[in-house]
Image (tube, coloured by chain):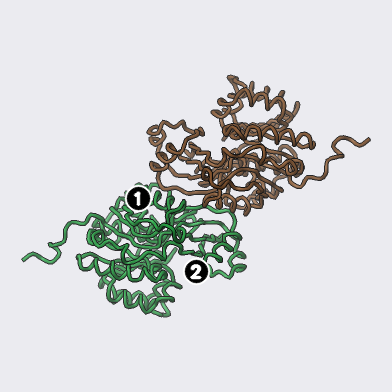
Chain colours: A green, B brown
Amino acid sequence: MPAPTAARPPARFDILAIGNAIVDVVAPVPDAFLAAHAMTKGAMALVDTAAADAIYAAMPPGQESSGGSAANTAAVAAMLGARVAYLGKVADDELGAVFRHDITAAGVHFPTPPLSGGAPTARCLIAVTPDGQRTMNTYLGACVSFAEADVDASVVAASEVVYLEGYLFDPPAAQAAFYAAAKAAHEAGRRVALSLSDAFCVGRHRAAFRDLVAGHVDILFANESEITSLYETATFEAAAEAARADTALAVLTRSEHGSVILRGAETVRVAAEPAEVIDTTGAGDAYAAGFLAALTAGRSLPACGRIASIAAAAAISQYGARPMVDLKALTAGVAD
Amino acid sequence: MPAPTAARPPARFDILAIGNAIVDVVAPVPDAFLAAHAMTKGAMALVDTAAADAIYAAMPPGQESSGGSAANTAAVAAMLGARVAYLGKVADDELGAVFRHDITAAGVHFPTPPLSGGAPTARCLIAVTPDGQRTMNTYLGACVSFAEADVDASVVAASEVVYLEGYLFDPPAAQAAFYAAAKAAHEAGRRVALSLSDAFCVGRHRAAFRDLVAGHVDILFANESEITSLYETATFEAAAEAARADTALAVLTRSEHGSVILRGAETVRVAAEPAEVIDTTGAGDAYAAGFLAALTAGRSLPACGRIASIAAAAAISQYGARPMVDLKALTAGVAD
């Protein structure tokens, strides 16, 4: 009798990422801008149309680029050579066309049909302070119509890892899509990865995330504030041990202090890659991309962490979440 | 009897810039991309909808930001503290809203009404090669409807310098707007500045530019290839002397070799500001902005050239034409 895994067909995709499809508007601001608009530095806040319009009107000139946490991860993983698909909802408008161009041009399969006649493509207004920290205000737009029907089970079953962003818990219909994707992945013998996305997002959905991580997630990505918020612990170390107990593989990032990878009794510590910090937007997304691209290519955990750190450093060295450099070349020398 | 200039009311604006209102799409490409698409490195080519769609489909993921040569100059001059207005035509669409936001957020008065029900907002597809050179493909869209009726004579009369981009000669109706603006400026006792924009643009409209420069322009901006194309001379020096004879003030840029300013018998040479070249898009626009902001503030010619060079260096140190740094602070130390 063959082992259970022998029944799985070969994966068509290394990674299927699912998330809110968003166009970013990035602009440099002084610290006083955050105070004037009651923004919490480093956090992501959800805003309605009126608030988005008011914030945009107050923002300095910006640069637009495709964003969305899981979409950034998909694009960066594809740049690194992984076979990647993405599911997320844009509208049938100019910014939706920009989003579709960019993720497709990155080599990502993007089958989700656009929304017609509804809300416009989502946008995230990102205020970047002189310390490189980004503070985000997201208008979800067309993302709120992403639902279970958009999760193509055949694509899920054909993907080695299904990667879900925690932000998907904000638009209510997407939660059902989230669980449907996790269920379909496990039924097909695939792995489910989750990024906690944001400490405030964890705070909004803590009980659901605790249940998810313990029961449905094989690979967990989180930064220090997210993981301590999830487990409500006083220290990073306590949260890390809780994550070790809950998931097969926990990947925890600590900005300039590097990252820690926990798998069973194994602990791998990875130094941060030095970088001049211009804009931290997408650092975590790029880290997850590097990690998953390397993991699905069969690389060692230290190599996964190293490649992830190089991708994150490239993301924070420029404005915008997706590095405009040759990441394959930058990571070519990493040994296992 | 008062001198003629005593009759002029005080200027409301230091600079009125008029040009094609364009959103840029910037992406890094290998040199082979230019060859594959028969593009001439460093040049601006006009493309129709079908060609623009085909080039965009082939381009890697990009970043969008407001562009347009004279609009860049307007935005950068405003960042430097000049009082600036801009005339140019966008459409009533998402990219038009981005353009309007950005130029308004830069502090520029932008009274031109958007085009409704016609072509979309213009875009320029900018392929940036590893040497930092930008090669541009422009779809003019709504710009072709910019016409004489869009030139508000009261704004022209209220502006110390009316700055016109040579690219305005590409959409036919804009040529009439160009002459109308120059005429209104001189009737109001104001100065007319012209940027030659691009050597190929000069080639397309050489006779008209020669007539313009000799008869209607007080301040001429050009780079080495543009000025030698205009006068069809073998050397930069010969072209510079021709420009000296034709205009009251000629400002000629030579990339890393700095710039030369000619006013009557006076010649001022300015060294280039050192910079790491990421993307040369907007270098000339930023130079003109720094120069005109300083000139209208009553600064000396060497200080004008120095401030211009610092603004240009900031533009080429990032992706996108409008520097996302504090230009006022960077130029605060320049002495006359």
Q: Quadrant of the N terminus of chain A?
A: bottom left
Q: Position of residue A228 (x, y in %)?
A: 41, 76
The quadrant where residue B157 appears: top right
Badge 2 vs badge 1, beta-carbon distance below 8 Å: no
Task: Name the residue furthest left.
Answer: A1
Q: Secondary structure at mark 2?
A: strand
A258 vs A10, left or right, is right
Q: Chain of mark 2?
A: A
Residues behind callouts 2 and 1 on a single chain:
yes
Identify whether B331 is placed above or below A244: above
Instruction: Give the residue type at disc 1.
Output: Met
Instruction: Give the residue type at disc 2.
Output: Ala
Q: Position of residue B331 (x, y in %)?
A: 66, 48
Q: Position of residue B122 (x, y in %)?
A: 53, 42
Q: Is residue A222 visible?
A: no
Residue that mark 1 sits on = A79
Task: Name the residue furthest right.
Answer: B1
The residue closer to the viewer here, B10 or B176, is B176
Choose the circle earlier in sequence order: 2 or 1.
2
Residue neighbourhood size for the residue with mark 2, other residues' Cα within 10 Å, grouped as few (<14), some (14–19), many (≥20)? some
Residue A45, disc: 2
Q: Secondary structure at mark 1?
A: helix
B175 vs A106, left or right, is right
Q: Quadrant of the C terminus of chain A?
A: bottom left
Q: Residue placed at 29% from the left, 63% from the top?
A: A162
Q: CA distance from mark 2 to mark 1?
A: 29 Å
Q: Position of residue A335 (x, y in %)?
A: 28, 53
Q: Chain of mark 1?
A: A
